[in-house]
Image (spheres, rainbow, N blue to C red):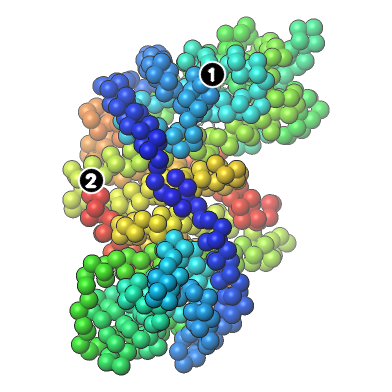
Amino acid sequence: MRFAFDDDQLAFRDAVQELLDKECTPAHVRAAWSNETGRVPGLWDKLVDMGVVGMLATEERGGLGLTMVDLVLILEVTGRYALPEPIVETAAFGVPFLERADVTVTADHTFVPWADTADVIVTAAGRFEHDAVELVARPSVDGSRRLFEARGTPTAVDGNALAAAFSRAVVGAAAQQCGLAQRMLDLTADYTKERRQFGVPIGSFQAVKHHLANARIALEFARPLVYRAAATSDPVHASMAKAKADEAALTTARAALQCHGAIGYTTEYDLHLYMKRAWALSRSKGDRRLHLDRVGQTIL
Amino acid sequence: MDLSFSPDEEAFRAECRAWLDANVPRPALPSGDTGEGFAAHLEWERKLFDARFAVVSWPAEFGGRDASLWEWLIFEEEYYRAGAPQRVTQNGIFLLAPTIFEFGTPEQRARILPRMAAGEETWCQGWSEPNAGSDLAGIQSKAVRDEAGNGWRLSGQKTWTTRGAFCTHLFGLFRSDPDAERHHGLTYFLVDLLSPGVTVRGVERLDGDEGFAEVFFDDVFVPDADVLGEPNQGWAVAMATTGSERGLTLRSPGRFLATAQRLIDLYREHGEDSGLHDRVVAAYIDAEAYRWQTFWTVTRAVEGINAGAESSMTKVFWSELDVRLHELALELLRDHAELLDGDTASWMKGYEFALAGPIYAGTNEIQRNVIAERVLGLPRR
Ligand SMILES: Cc1cc2nc3c(=O)[nH]c(=O)nc-3n(C[C@H](O)[C@H](O)[C@H](O)COP(=O)(O)OP(=O)(O)OC[C@H]3O[C@@H](n4cnc5c(N)ncnc54)[C@H](O)[C@@H]3O)c2cc1C
């Protein structure tokens, strides 16, 4: 037993983090809220070049032949930066599902994000190609997540492969939730150290401390389930991970907003970018209720 | 990343399982927090010791098997899975022993550990005093130097001492430098409770058992050989013990997985239409989360990274999980939950015990302060 990442995995993660630190700042995410695509212009190609997007494809098919264990850490980082790109849908779901590294894919049960800029769209109904689908835009609470309903005549997909792909997407979304929780926690810890009331930093008040301690605990116990699910490919483990990671992200969002006060309640401040992504992800790739049902079907 | 146990570890698991299945007493022993129950538990401890299962992680020379942390976790999982008795020796073997391994002299190890492992000497923990609970540095019990006797004379009072009425020995902190304040000038003593001047009074706990004790010290002589670590450096030594108490050693995941599994069984029997589906499943997931977070922590420990203040997160999590598991069981049991007879009584008893978790080993309010200050870096007051 060795439940830890190896140095190569951590180094790859750090490299992606370095890229996003420059190219996926809050200003970039904010800009994606109002641009045409909801994405960060030029960033996807860089992720493709780094090998992130095609990681799970075999080398013959233009990928890196890596596994979900390698990818999960990177997806966690994409959550931390609220990367507004279909990275979970493509890297975790689509690339191994289609066995090719050169496509952009989006997928979900019903509402598919960034579908207008994807080559292939997969929903519970089946598979749609970009040039043979009618897309109806549906606004998301997270302005950068351009959501669509796909209409048209889908082609059927292999149920087993779809289930496995969906399970990877569930782990991916759970990883992003952990990254988002971490981001909101960092932002709030920094804020509460600076902001002063009654002559002292508000972070010295015990009520504030306990909100943030609760968030930190929730994250501490979500992460290992996500990493475990990445390693086992077991759909029940994926469901446990998503249920727990959603809880961590939503608990943190709530604590973060409360500890910020009114500044957190503005859209000028960055918190809402991460909070709304967490809300949105908690409803996508199966919500907590769906995943608790799945776990319940196995254990009860 | 490798999530499998090795063939040797699996073989060890099989050995533990087979032995426990054949030896765990049925019906269950009476509570170890009563005089009669304590004696019955010590017999069980003796049996464990003879089979070299009492202290698997210790070196063989002290009665252990030199088991790795992983094997220790496996043993614990099997122990609770088998429904084996509570460990009345736990404060010795899980809290004091790691501290003796770290700070004790070779003479202390050789003298104390084998008898502790065999259950011949049993240890209770003497931190709390009437005026020093969460604020442990407020300890007032005193140790005065006895030069002629090459030792110390203790006076004062300890309280909430778990199983103090049944144990033979106590480890605790006493103020040895009257001029020093707070964390300074404290010494860690190992005290024989049969020494002249010691009075122990049992106190009934919430669950009706005499699990607590008050221990009074009236000019009790303790030789230098029974000082653990350096005189006046007791705080640092004690912190090692409390680290064990919050973290892994006292509350391994096997315990909560076993309770979660019993909750699942109860749900299968009574759960339909209870409206508790999601909460029961979520509690089960939490027990799994505790297991995997432990594996994460143990991997780091094996590679030399100490959990430090992070053990405060562990303590809050397991204690609140334990309460949740029992609350759900009581909800499932409906009017039977109240009963102290029949097969469901263990849930009410378990609930009463679980409620202590957020209080002992540093209250969860204190732990949350620690998490905020030492993990997240928020300012102290
Ligand atoms: C079942 C059980 C077994 C025990 N066994 C032992 C034992 O074997 N040996 C031993 O020495 N002790 C033992 N204890 C005692 C235990 O260590 C203390 O109960 C604990 O440290 C709290 O101290 P207190 O009870 O004096 O409560 P107090 O410290 O008076 O606290 C009361 C309440 O105030 C809160 N509070 C106090 N200070 C703060 C703060 N700074 N910030 C926020 N909230 C605060 C606490 O969280 C708590 O909710 C045991 C307790 C129990 C319940």
Q: Earlier in the sequence, mark 2 or mark 1?
A: 1
Residue at the spot 43% in from the left edge and 18% down from the top edge: B49
Instruction: Label 2: state its secondary structure.
Output: helix
Q: Quadrant of residue A199?
A: bottom right
> Residue B162's x, y, as percent?
50, 24
> Residue B198's x, y, as percent?
60, 11
Q: Is A49 left, or right, of B78 in this rendering?
A: right
Residue at the spot 26% in from the left edge and 37% down from the top edge: B337
Q: Is residue B73 above or below residue B119?
A: below
Q: Is residue A20 above or below residue B321?
A: below
Image quadrant, ligand 1: top right
The mark found on residue B61 in the picture is 1
Frontmost residue, B9 versus A178: B9
Instruction: Label 1: state its secondary structure.
Output: helix
Frontmost residue, A139 versus A286: A286
Q: Given the image, on which type of amino acid does mark 1 rest?
A: Glu
Q: Given the image, on which type of amino acid does mark 2 rest?
A: Tyr
Q: Is residue B170 above or below residue A28?
A: above
- Distance from disc 2 to disc 1, alpha carbons, whole Å, reads 46 Å
How dense is the environment of label 1, judged by Cα within 10 Å: few (below 14), some, or many (20 and up)?
few
Disc 1 within 8 angstroms of ligand 1 (CB):
no
> Residue A73's x, y, as percent?
49, 63
Residue at the spot 46% in from the left edge and 92% down from the top edge: A36
The mark found on residue B267 in the picture is 2
Which mark lies nearer to you, 2 or 1?
1
Q: Is A182 left, or right, of A151 in this rendering?
A: right
Residue at the spot 64% in from the left edge and 34% down from the top edge: B239
